[in-house]
Image (cartoon, coloured by chain):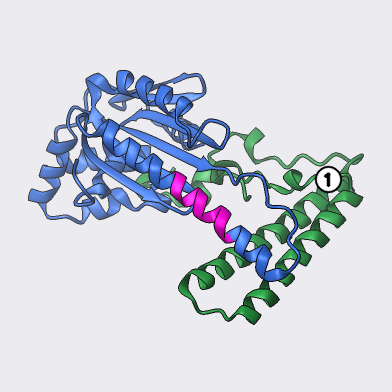
Chain colours: A blue, B green
Amino acid sequence: MTALIGWTLLDQTSAAEPFTTETDGGVARVLWSDPPSDARARLRLFGRAFAVLDAFLPASDSALALDPQRREALVRRMQGHAQLSIGLHVAQGAKPGQPGNGRAYLRARQAAQRQQRAMCAQMVETLSTVMRDQVTDRRVLSFPTDVHAHYLVRRSEADHIRSDLVQMLRTHPSCSGRGQAVVTGPWPASAAVWAEGSGRV
Amino acid sequence: MSDPVHLSLADALSALPPSAQRVVIDPETVEQDLARLLLGLMELLRQVMELQAIRRMDAGTLTAAQEDALGTTLMRAEAAIHDMAAKFDLEPEDLSLDLGPLGRTI
């Protein structure tokens, strides 16, 4: 869905923008041609491309508030990189049989949720291991039953890494039959702005 | 479009193609569609309450009696919602509402 919104907004931007978009299997891809050299202008551009994301993650606004040196450092770190985003939802397994009382019911739900959390934690650990050598920055938000991970990878390798990720997620025990995983990107490295200090690999 | 950096969510949603904004109502299934919407919201609220109950269990702030009372309430609420859904030929999984860009509720 993120891809769809991004594409929709990007599609309305001027043809003179330094990027174009294309769709591949329903996933939008952003192709850069000539990003502006000025850091502030570039961050504004990222903000424009990801305006909807910014409604949830105020990335570009906070980045614009940085002092010029930090802003330049952010842009330097993003240069030549693309973002891959991963969404994973681990579905709850078969519901436990109807227990005899309320306490047993709640305990059974608690156990099911713990199992989901464990599977998400396992997926985050797997992703960390797989991406360690390929990632500049990462941001992983792990909720009880969902994983949202954003990785900043070298743009030249983004397609290759994405293919590997898709393959891995398809066969990972946390996904096969129990979960739904979506990999989007390569995106401009915008959302990585807010990942600063969130844990380098 | 105004300054896109400060584009609001409402602006962004209005930028979606018309087909994504349109609510499709079929006169033949309007009762079932409304039941799906209302029961889906009820089930969502029930699940939120269940999550909160589990958090309190994890934190150890519930007595055994409170756990039993909460669990019984949630269990009966789930059964009642599913019973009502069945009257409209809806399965429990039909109560998952598609919120478009925001994903599904359940």
- For the C terminus of chain A, give its image quadrant: top left
Q: Nearer the viewer, residue A136 or A145?
A: A145
- The residue that appears at 68% across and 75% down in the rendered structure is B68
Position in image of residue A143 (x %, y %): 44, 53
Instruction: Answer left or right for A55 relative to B93.
Output: left
Q: Nearer the viewer, residue A7 or B95?
A: B95
Chain at numbered mark 1: B
Count how many numbered circles sit on residues in the image.
Answer: 1
Magenta region = A110-119
Position in image of residue A76 (x %, y %): 12, 37
- The residue that appears at 42% across and 30% down in the rendered structure is A184
Position in image of residue B2 (x %, y %): 41, 46
Report the amino acid beneath label 1: Leu
Whether residue A114 appears in magenta in the rendering, the answer is yes
Residue at the spot of label 1: B90
Where A14 falls versus B34 (above or below)?
above
- The residue that appears at 59% across and 34% down in the rendered structure is B17
Instruction: Answer left or right for A121 relative to A173.
Output: left
Magenta segment, prevailing SS (helix, strand or loop) = helix
Where A154 falls versus A113 (above or below)?
above
Q: Does any portion of residue A10 appear in the rendered image?
A: yes
Q: Does any portion of residue A45 appear in the rendered image?
A: no
Q: Residues within 10 Å of mark 1 (few under 14, many from 20)?
A: some
Q: Nearer the viewer, residue A170 or A25?
A: A170
Instruction: Answer left or right for B10 relative to A150.
Output: right
Position in image of residue B61 (x %, y %): 51, 79
Which quadrant would residue A157 be assigned to in this image? top left
- The residue that appears at 47% across and 47% down in the rendered structure is A146
What is the secondary structure assignment of the residue under circle 1?
loop
Whether residue B73 appears in magenta in the rendering, the answer is no
